[in-house]
Image: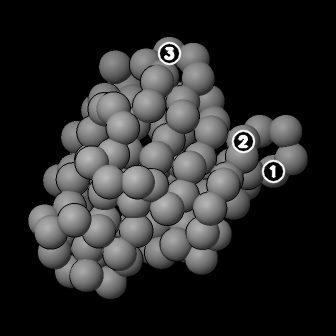
Amino acid sequence: GPVAKTFRVIQGAVTEEYVRSTQGVFQFELSGDGGGTWYIDLKTKGGSAGFGKPPVTADVVMSMSSADFVKMFTDKLKLFMAFMPGNSTIKGDIMLTLSLEKML
């Protein structure tokens, strides 16, 4: 589905440089089609992204619909637009979220 495809793209975009400069782990709680728990690990050497809980504790947990998540990563929705009241929630280090936006 679109969520899995998006994570494949993210996985391909993860570089050592991003991991070094970001040092953060993001967990996504997605609702709807292709939802569930997904993660992007930009802390562990090499970095990774995929389905399930991150290998280490997340610094940021984001809850949103899978549709908004896919839109966010295909640039149809700015990261912070996704978190307008009522749409989604972010728990954790908001500044790390900004570094994620650079990667998108």
Relative height, residue 17 to residue 6 (above, below):
below
* Mark seen at residue 88: 2
Q: Position of residue 52 (x, y in %)?
A: 33, 32
Q: Position of residue 23 (x, y in %)?
A: 35, 75
Q: Amino acid at mark 3?
A: Asp
Q: Which residue is mark 3?
A: 33
* Mark seen at residue 49: none
Q: Amino acid at mark 2?
A: Ser
Residue at far front of view: 57
Q: What is the distance, in whole Å, between disc 1 and disc 2 at their CAs?
A: 7 Å
Neighbour tally class for label 2: few under 14, some 14-19, many 20 plus, Cα within 10 Å: some
Q: Is residue 76 visible?
A: no
Q: Position of residue 64 (x, y in %)?
A: 63, 36
For marks 1 and 3, the one nearer the N-term is: 3
Q: Which residue is mark 1?
A: 84
SS of the residue at dot 1?
loop
How many marks overall?
3
Relative height, residue 74 to residue 52 (above, below):
below
Q: Amino acid at mark 1?
A: Met
Quadrant in the rendering for residue 17: bottom left
- From the image, which quarter does the C terminus lie in? bottom left
Identify which residue is drawn at 67% across, 53% down: 90
Identify which residue is drawn at 31% across, 65% down: 42
Q: Are marks 1 and 2 in contact (CB under 8 Å)?
A: yes
